Amino acid sequence: MNLLRPGLSRFFVGCISLALVVAARGVSAQAIAAGTASASPAMPSLHISPVMGFNFSIDYTAQHNSATGWANIVTPELSYRWNRYLSADTSVPWFATLKAFVPVKTGTTTTDELESGNSLLGDTDVSGHLELAHKDLTYLLTTSVGFSTGNTRYGLSANTTTYNITNHFDYSVGPFTPDIEIGEGDNSTLANQTVRRIYTAVGPLANFQVGSAIDLPWNMSLDLEAYEELPIGNQNVYGTVTTKSKKGKTVTKQVLQGTGEAEDNGFTSELDVPLGHYVMLNGSYARSLIQGLDTASIGMTWTLRAPKIPKID
């Protein structure tokens, strides 16, 4: 169910995005005048290279979705950072194994059956980042473009070129770094990259997030977020979307390949545990409230050039 009219929602997102950019420019000017070095968030995204010049990383994730089961995903990423403000990266996920509901036609009848897939690509993601900081306040503008290189049959592709623009603000208070995000685009995969979904929704979409990162002992960190992905126009959905029954006790699986809407909201949590200088162990859990899905994953990320882990007294 849409909570906002499409015109009002688009206007709301646009106004707040513009206000955030203007405010961030003021923060940047103060930082430059004071000669303050850029401070990274307590839990920076893996899509932002922490070192100057080229960098390369490989992420392996084993993910379990309550609707389709296990998937094994390998994501190589190439990045480049020009200075403390500007960076860019590109990545393409490779699904070594996964299960998905796909349409199977028998005569004149089409049914949706759970099938296993092997060695399948997802869409290529190219992102640019502008990071501005002043003392404990950090603003991050991320512009992403998705290219249709993935497998549409298994819900791994938007089947067209897509985009997303997201504004991120966070403020460090002791071990806590509360954050807020607001963005707009036309691809559900680009709107939230924490969890690999079993579908791709393409169409006007506003994305929101609020939560906090928490610094833990031994350089570990925990990120807790609530999110909302709100369609502000018709969606073309590739893959499987789950819906609750009227009694809320069962989940109905359906594959949509035409026009429809795929609103999603819920909670995500992610724990990062550094294993030495170049390797990060991570685990995550996501609960989709509106779709009734649980997604859990465990993975490991290796980075070619990593900053030294600061010592905690």
Image (cartoon, rainbow, N blue to C red):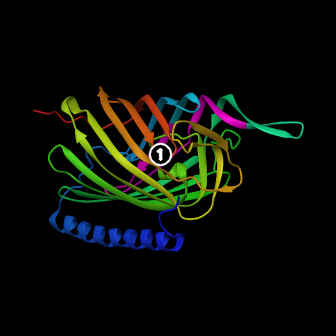
On the image, the x and y values in percent for residue 82 come to 38, 55
Instruction: Tell me, yes or no, if residue 51 can be seen here.
Output: no
Q: Would you identify the image quadrant in which residue 131 lies?
A: bottom left
The structure residue drawn at horizontal position 20% and vertical position 51%, both measured from the top left corner, is 172
* Secondary-structure class at tag 1: loop
The structure residue drawn at horizontal position 68% and vertical position 48%, both measured from the top left corner, is 256
Please, is residue 16 above or below residue 274 in the view? below
Task: Point out the image quarter for the C terminus.
Answer: top left
On the image, the x and y values in percent for residue 228 come to 43, 54
On the image, the x and y values in percent for residue 115 come to 69, 29
Number of numbered discs visible in the structure rendering: 1
Tell me if 289 is positioned left or right of 156 in this view.
left
Residue nearer the viewer, 74 or 18: 18
Is residue 88 rendered magenta in the image? yes
Name, please, the residue furthest toward the left: 313
Instruction: Tell me, yes or no, if residue 147 can be seen here.
Output: yes
For the residue carrying disc 1, how many other residues have a C-alpha within 10 Å: few (<14), some (14-19), or many (20+)?
Answer: few
Is residue 147 rendered magenta in the image? no
Q: Main SS of the magenta segment? A: strand
Name, please, the residue furthest toward the right: 107
Please, is residue 194 above or below residue 280 in the view? below
Tell me if 240 is positioned left or right of 189 in this view.
right
The structure residue drawn at horizontal position 47% and vertical position 34%, both measured from the top left corner, is 295
On the image, the x and y values in percent for residue 267 come to 39, 44
Check disc 1 and report the residue beneath it.
193
Magenta part of the chain: 76-102
Residue nearer the viewer, 135 or 292: 292
Tell me if 116 is positioned left or right of 233 in this view.
right
Looking at numbered disc 1 in the image, what kind of residue is underneath it? Gln
